[in-house]
């Protein structure tokens, strides 16, 4: 009898102190891969994201590794294969990833701009000394886009130009894909192109302002001659098949980041984010429709 009582007590203690849900998924996911979209050079991405991934690791209690992708397609493939657990997208690249994974990813968070503005704008930059004052003044000139899956650097600009009656490959002498927003602006600065699309959030936050803050150029070297419609702020998405407890923990870590580790958020955003808020797939349905339209345009050109 005494032996039975001891066994019962041991069983009770084992249950009382058994690993909770977080420990259950922790054994299944000893490491999480967080992929970053290529908006700048790889050194810049690593420097900005490392403190934030360290914060995520402390908060989630599991290793979090930043993966610097070569392009948006690599981020998408990483989530399609299941190798990338969390990814920071643009709206269009998220729409593409959601489509190719058959809904295998979900947007769960996005950032809040420091100045209270919502969304971003695709804008067309020219050098300050350029005589161009409208997009039509660049007919027969060279254009720099960013990446085929970039929202502000390709898809919305193409959609916007279509509404203006412009087919880029016919209107411009050459159309270049620069690969990143920084490379597009550098191409403009060096004369490879006469106009370059990139993103603009406010006078204090844009691709040009961030490059100026890093000493790569002077902001007054460029001016905007065209601004497209506002688009939603870029989403962060995780794999839909992750355990529910883990997904909740990841979302909470992002939403609570500015309160728990503001320096990491400031480093990630160059001080331009108030923090992150919860988001959902529904906010990016319009991006999926836009992508389908752009795909139709591509098929017509083939």
Image: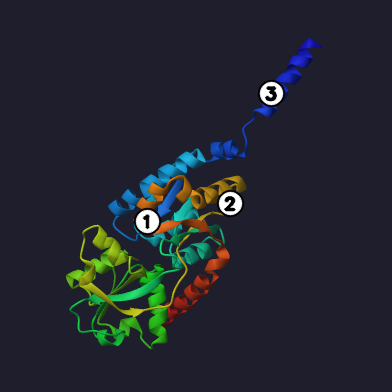
Q: Secondary structure at mark 3?
A: helix
State which tag comes first along the sequence, 1 or 3. 3
Labels 2, 3: front one: 3
The answer to whether residue 156 is left or right of residue 279 is left
Q: CA distance from mark 2 to mark 1?
A: 29 Å
Labels 1, 3: front one: 1
Q: CA distance from mark 2 to mark 3?
A: 32 Å
State which tag comes first along the sequence, 2 or 1. 2
Q: Residue furthest right?
A: 1
The answer to whether residue 116 is left or right of residue 71 is right
- Disc 1 target residue: 269
Asked if 248 appears above or below 27 in the picture, the reply is: below
Q: Name the image quarter holding the C terminus.
A: bottom left
- Disc 2 target residue: 241
Q: Quadrant of residue 159?
A: bottom left
In-front residue for pair 93/267? 267
- Disc 3 target residue: 13
Q: Is residue 302 visible?
A: no
How crowded pointer 3 is (Cα within 10 Å; few <14, some 14-19, many 20+) is rated as few
How crowded pointer 1 is (Cα within 10 Å; few <14, some 14-19, many 20+) is rated as some
Q: Are marks 1 and 3 in contact (CB under 8 Å)?
A: no
Asked if 134 appears above or below 237 in the picture, the reply is: below
Q: Are marks 2 and 3 in contact (CB under 8 Å)?
A: no
State which tag comes first along the sequence, 2 or 3. 3
Residue 198 horizontal/vertical position (percent) = 33, 70
């Amino acid at each position: 009898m005494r032996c039975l009582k001891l066994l019962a007590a041991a069983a009770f203690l084992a249950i009382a102190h058994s690993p909770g849900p977080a420990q259950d998924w922790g054994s299944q996911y000893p490491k999480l891969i967080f992929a970053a979209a290529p908006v700048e050079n790889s050194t810049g991405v690593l420097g900005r994201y490392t403190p934030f991934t360290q914060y995520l690791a402390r908060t989630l209690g599991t290793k979090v590794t930043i993966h610097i992708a070569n392009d948006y397609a690599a981020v998408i493939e990483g989530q399609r294969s299941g190798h990338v657990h969390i990814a920071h997208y643009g709206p269009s690249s998220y729409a593409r990833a959601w489509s190719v994974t058959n809904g295998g990813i979900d947007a769960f968070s996005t950032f809040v701009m420091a100045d209270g503005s919502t969304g971003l704008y695709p804008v067309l930059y020219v050098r300050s000394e350029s005589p161009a004052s409208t997009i039509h003044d660049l007919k027969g000139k060279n254009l720099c886009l960013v990446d085929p899956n970039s929202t502000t650097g390709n898809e919305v600009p193409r959609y916007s130009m279509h509404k203006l009656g412009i087919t880029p490959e016919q209107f411009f002498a050459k159309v270049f894909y620069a690969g990143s927003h920084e490379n597009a602006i550098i191409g403009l600065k060096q004369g490879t192109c006469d106009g370059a699309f990139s993103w603009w959030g406010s006078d204090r936050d844009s691709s040009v302002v961030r490059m100026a803050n890093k000493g790569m150029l002077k902001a007054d070297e460029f001016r905007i001659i065209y601004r497209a419609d506002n688009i939603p702020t870029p989403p962060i998405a995780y794999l839909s098949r992750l355990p529910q407890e883990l997904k909740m923990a990841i979302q909470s870590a992002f939403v609570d980041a500015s309160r728990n580790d503001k320096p990491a958020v400031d480093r990630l955003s160059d001080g331009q984010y108030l923090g992150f808020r919860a988001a959902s797939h529904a906010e990016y349905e319009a991006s999926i429709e836009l992508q389908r339209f752009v795909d139709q345009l591509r098929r017509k050109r083939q």
